[in-house]
Image: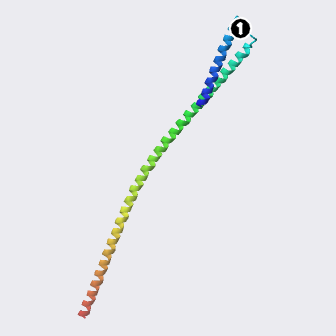
Amino acid sequence: MAHTKELADEQRDQSAQIYDESARALSNVEGIKLPFVDLDQLGEQASSLTQESTQSLNNVQQKVDEGKETQHKAEKLIHEMGESLKSAEEKQKYIDRQMQEVEQYHSRANDAFDQATKTWNEAKDSHESLTGQLDNHRYFLL
């Protein structure tokens, strides 16, 4: 884009230079007889170059504006993605905490199950022992 703008500036400068040269040529013609120069044609060329330069500058400005708009959209998208990432990280941290709690509850449940199994086995052993003692007392009583 910068190169296009430079070319447009050069064309504008050239058209101004041609215009100045044609004005000097006209004043020289009045003072000195020179070979025939078509001033209308030079004026048309200068006008044409000026129009081309103006159009080139307008095109460059349009491209610059489009680039700025694209940059703005990209910056907005990057910001939105950053916010989404932060939100996802916060959700991940929350899920990690939830998983830690589940693991703690699982560990407690396993401990409770082990304790219940131990108590059950002790109660079963006590029951069997008492049942055996009761059977022995009945046998002696009979």
Q: Residue at x 33, y 68 (%)?
A: 111
Q: Residue furthest top?
A: 31
Quarter that holds the N terminus: top right
Please, what secondary structure does the residue beneath circle 1 have?
helix
Residue 30 in percent (x, y) is at 70, 6
Q: Residue at x 70, y 5 (%)?
A: 31
Q: Along the horizontal axis of the image, is 14 left or right of 120?
A: right
Would residue 20 be seen by someone viewing this image from the given angle?
Answer: yes
**Vertical relation: 98 (above or below) 121:** above
Q: Is disc 1 surrounded by few (<14), some (14 to 19) or many (20+) residues within 10 Å?
A: some
Q: Nearer the viewer, residue 19 or 50?
A: 19
Q: Along the horizontal axis of the image, is 73 left or right of 131?
A: right
Q: Quadrant of residue 38?
A: top right
Q: Residue at x 28, y 89 (%)?
A: 135
- The residue where tag 1 is placed is 29
Q: Residue at x 57, y 34 (%)?
A: 67
**Vertical relation: 44 (above or below) 88:** above
Q: Along the horizontal axis of the image, is 34 left or right of 139?
A: right
